[in-house]
Amino acid sequence: MRKNIAFLDFLRVISILSVIAIHTAAGVLTKIAKPLQTNIYLAIICTLFFCVPIFFMISGTLFLSPEKKAPLKTLFFKYIRRLILALFIFGTAFALASIIIKNQFTFKPIFLWQAFLNMLKGENSGAHMWFLYDMLIIYLLIPILKPIINRINKSLYLSALIVLFAAFSLLPCASQLMHWNITVPLFPIFVFYFLCGDYIYRFVDCNRIPCPIIISVIIICLIGIYANIFHSLGIISNYNMPFVAIYSMAIYILARKKIKSAPKCAKLRPYIFSVYIIHNAFIAGFYKFFNITPLICGGYILLPIFVCFFTVISFATAYVMKKIPILSKYVL
């Protein structure tokens, strides 16, 4: 399978733009005093929640396909190595920056060791870097998952997905609504998305699903998301929310159906991973050190401008980073 399938390139780009927009809005969420504005910002964030599920679905589409040949040597010494080095370099750097800030911008050599330990534990190593930790675990599961799903039939595959969805999306939602004392881990829903990407790509004929039906599903899910925010249904808005899961799958299907060519997105594809790693450093740094946020002008007009600014500076930095041979070859 070619890596530059047009609809996947398109999904990568809209997902990374959504990630930047989410963190741009979330970075000032705690500073908003008006409940209505808080809800509007939450609505914007939740509308863009499809981005992370889509990233996992893209990876599932590429790695679980029978056409994808990923020997253990390639998996470990190319893909897993890249994630580990990214966490080691950037996760440790973010953790070190956090320690230095907490110590009033003083530096001691011991901070390097503390930052490394924090990176290993996933503490203060960048709020967005959790994605790399979870993706690393999923990559480690590929040698187990791929032989199984490549041998089971379509019906059994679909049944497994339904069970995962019921256990890790519907159950936590029902638990919150009914006030049951049930704790359901979040990570398995990402495994569900990873498998979904492969299943939809291989077994769902997206061209036979009418666009009005797909769009109607998206609208219904958005209504459910907004009802939960503005009318306090009691469901925690997260990536395992049923509305978010169905909404994300509908967007994947719509893109698969409609996007046949995306040359501009293909040109941006090599920088997506770098942009994901670096973008939040600019957002957090800009808000903290300059104390300039979208809220200085009401919180609405400047938000898209800030998103555009952080997008441009992140892609520009990613372009420079890719020019550094050792980073480009081994990390990015």
Image: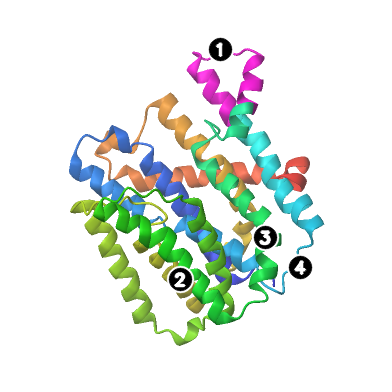
Q: Residue furthest front?
A: 181
Q: Which residue is mark 4?
A: 69
- The part of the chain drawn in magenta is 94-116
- SS type, badge 1: loop
Kind of residue sitting beneath label 3:
Ile
Q: Is residue 204 above or below residue 218?
A: below
Q: Is residue 262 magenta?
A: no
Q: Residue furthest right?
A: 73
Q: Which residue is mark 3?
A: 142
On residue 162, the disc is: 2
Mark 3 vs mark 2: which is more N-terminal? 3
Q: Which residue is mark 1?
A: 106
Q: Are marks 4 and 3 in contact (CB under 8 Å)?
A: no
Q: CA distance from mark 1 to mark 4?
A: 49 Å
Tell me where residue 141 appears, x and y as whole percent: 65, 57
- SS type, badge 4: loop
Kind of residue sitting beneath label 1:
Thr
